Image (spheres, helix red, strand yellow):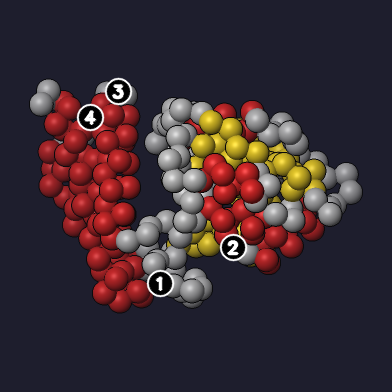
Amino acid sequence: MSLPLSIFIIAKNEVDRIGPTLESVRGLSDDIVVIDSGSTDGTQELAERLGARVIFNPWPGYGLQKQFGEDKCRHHWMLNIDADEVVTTELAASIMAALGQADLAPCGYETDIIEMFPGEAKPHAWAFRLSPVRLYHKQIGRYSPSPVHDRVDLVKGTPVHRLQGVIEHRSIRSLGHELIKLNAYADMQADDLYKKGRKIGALRLVLEFPLAFLKAYIARRHFVRGLYGFMTAMNYAFYRYLRLAKYWERRLGR
């Protein structure tokens, strides 16, 4: 039996990944919404065949696109997942148990999101994870309008609980795909830094690559993935450097 829950997903050209995403939440909701920003690969048709409502909206940035998705949800409880994420059966059961409580007051729920690399059939035991709020009641939470950051801003004092299980995040298709994706992020973040008038010194530009590599390889534990982990850490470091280089390019008017 479906819950009084809406699930919304932003997507563009995700036909190779959105199928498992939609299958993983099919039993949780009678209102699954895909906000598509102009796919040309059949994403919309596949999503509709799998039971989603597909709504087109030109890309305004991450936060604003997710706000648009929130506004299209029919229920007060909302779950946000990305088109490259899969809800595990344990997490689905935890969501059903949480929303099945009698007299449940509006609140937020955080869950682990664990990154997976190409070729991995299951999450690595030591893979890096984030724990953002992804399940929440619309009375107490809304996505930030930031064009580059997507986080749920909660009303101050809102209780936040924890769900069991994880979201499996298959963010990259290949190293080349990762670089294309990170280059787009770098452009958006450079624009955001420039528009906000942020002051970033030249020394930060010089140190960003080595420090970002250590952050990914050690702190985010890419080293446990062997050579592939080294390569993804290098990509991450280059992206962190590139966003600052592009910001400086804008400052210099070039």
Contact between labelled residues 1 and 2, with CB atoms less than 8 Å apart: no
Helix, strand or loop status at disc 4: loop
Q: Label 1: state its secondary structure.
A: loop
In the image shown, does 30 or 199 lie closer to the viewer? 30
- Which residue appears at 32% of the width and 29% of the height? 192
Res. 155 image quadrant: top right
* Image side of residue 100 versus residue 193, left or right: right
Q: Nearer the viewer, mark 1 or mark 3?
A: 1
Residue 199: numbered disc: 4
Question: Tag 2 or tag 3, which sits nearer the N-term?
Answer: 2
Residue 126 seen from this side:
no
Residue where numbered disc 3 is placed: 195
Circle 3 residues within 10 Å: few <14, some 14–19, many ≥20 = few
Q: Nearer the viewer, residue 97 or 57?
A: 57
Q: Residues within 10 Å of mark 2 (few under 14, many from 20)?
A: many
Tell me what residue is drawn at x 43 percent, y 40 percent.
40
Q: Depth-wise, is mark 1 or mark 4 nearer the camera?
A: 1
- Measured in 3D between alpha carbons, the distance from the residue under mark 3 to the one under mark 2, in whole angstroms, is 36 Å
| Residue pictured at 75% horizontal, 36% vertical | 75
